[in-house]
Every structure is written in structure tokens, then in C-alpha cells.
Image: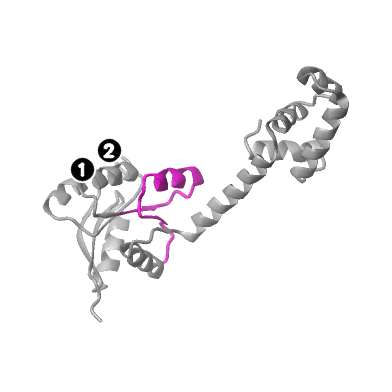
Amino acid sequence: MVTMLIKILLVDDHRILLDGLKALFDNDSEFEIIAAVSSPAEALEKLKLQQPDILLTDYTLPGMTGLELSTKVKELYPNIKRVILSMHDEGHLVKQVMKEGVDGYLLKNIQQGELKAALRQIMQGMPYISPEITKQLMTGLANESKHVLLTDREQEIVKLIVKEFSNKQIAEKLFISERTVETHRKNIFRKTNTASLVGLVKFALEHNIM
């Protein structure tokens, strides 16, 4: 069985990491490094001469981010697979990157075997995200779903409860009866699985209700 040669352009402004990655792939006949550069400008110059199968780039780079570079590469060379290799595991950043249609988001603590397997998968047309990031994103989705469980009125009341408004004060402010407030309060504590003001404050902070 003939193994497909995967050509890679490496971009990272940390020379020691760049050299390490180059050595890793140079020792594997399945991969070929066509260039290893430390800036987006160098990468774009190299691409004028030769196009790889995969652009493997850090996120934090001089001049532009790895995401901006990958977006530019997509415009110029749509057939190149684009993979971000980063130390950043923040959910909001990963979502932003994936919205741009990159083919992979890998953390720099990735094992050598997993890195190579991820690139093979990406070459087969299947995006790859490091498992740690997937877990974080799933947790974030679970938290968001809890937030959605609260109606707009309940979220409004949560904000007032957190400010230590009494039922009477909430009723007056929202032009509803105290009995209605009490019902909302019970539903809120049940839905958020909290039993105290401290617990509710924590919930409100975690879900950006405040």
C-alpha cells in the first residue's frame, strides 16, 4: 500500500518549537516539511513558490494572528488545509477559529502520535479538535443550556434577587403580585439547582446573567 506524502508548511515564532516540529516530521517518511518560517510574511512568500497540503501555524504571531494568516491562505490557495497549533484553549477563541472554517485546532501539549494522526485525519477531509478543547466546548454548551432554561422574566428576577430585592420590592418594580414573584423564585432555585442566595449569585456570574 502506497502511503500519501503529506507536505507541510510550519509557521511559529518560537525557533525551538519550530526546530522540534521540523525534526519530528523529518524523521517520518510520510511527511515532508517544505518550509519552516517564523512569521506570516515569510509564510506568504514561501507559498508563492510552493504550496503544501497543510499550513500548520501558531495562533500568536508577529504582524497578524495565525487565524488571519489562515484566512488569507484560504483566499489565495483554497485547497490548502489550515491547522492552528496553539497554547490557547479558551472556548471563545476556539469557536472564533472554527467559525472561520479551519480544518483543525490543536493544543501544543499534543502527543507526537496524536499530532500525526490528526494531520492524517485532516487530509482525509475530517476536521480535528484536541479532545481537551472538545470537552471544554461541551461543558460550555451544557452551561448555556442551563441559562436557556430560565425565561426572560426569570432572568430579570434573578438579577433583582442577586441585588437582594425582597419579593415585595420585585413585585412593585415589575408590576406583578408577590405571589407571582414567589412562584418565580421557587422555579428559579429549582431550575438552577441552588438553595441559597450565594449559590444563585454564583450561577448568575457563571452564566453572565448579572
Residue 111, image quadrant: bottom left
Look at the picture and state if 134 lies above or below 59: below
Badge 2: residue crowd in 10 Å (few <14, some 14–19, many ≥20): few
The secondary structure type at the circle numbered 2 is loop
Q: How is the image coloured?
A: one colour
Please say whether residue 125 is one of the residues in the magenta stretch: no
Please say whether residue 109 is one of the residues in the magenta stretch: yes
Q: In which quadrant of the rendered image does the C terminus lie?
A: top right
The residue depicted at 31 percent of the width and 44 percent of the height is 61
Look at the picture and state if 96 lies above or below 115: above
Q: As drawn, is 183 to the left or to the right of 29?
A: right
Residue 62, image quadrant: top left
Task: Tell me the magenta residue range.
Answer: 82-111
Q: As drawn, is 93 to the left or to the right of 201?
A: left
Position of residue 178 measured from the top left corner of the image (x, y, whole percent): 87, 25
Q: Which mark is residue 173?
A: none
Position of residue 99 measured from the top left corner of the image (x, y, whole percent): 41, 45
Position of residue 46 measured from the top left corner of the image (x, y, whole percent): 16, 51
The residue depicted at 14 percent of the width and 55 percent of the height is 50
Residue 18, image quadrant: bottom left
Q: Which residue is mark 2?
A: 63
Q: Is any part of residue 39 visible from this angle?
A: no
Q: Which residue is mark 1?
A: 41
Residue nearest the observer in this picture, 111 or 82: 82
Q: Evaluate if marks 2 and 1 touch, with contact meaning CB atoms under 8 Å apart.
A: yes
Badge 1: residue crowd in 10 Å (few <14, some 14–19, many ≥20): few
The residue depicted at 20 percent of the width and 43 percent of the height is 41
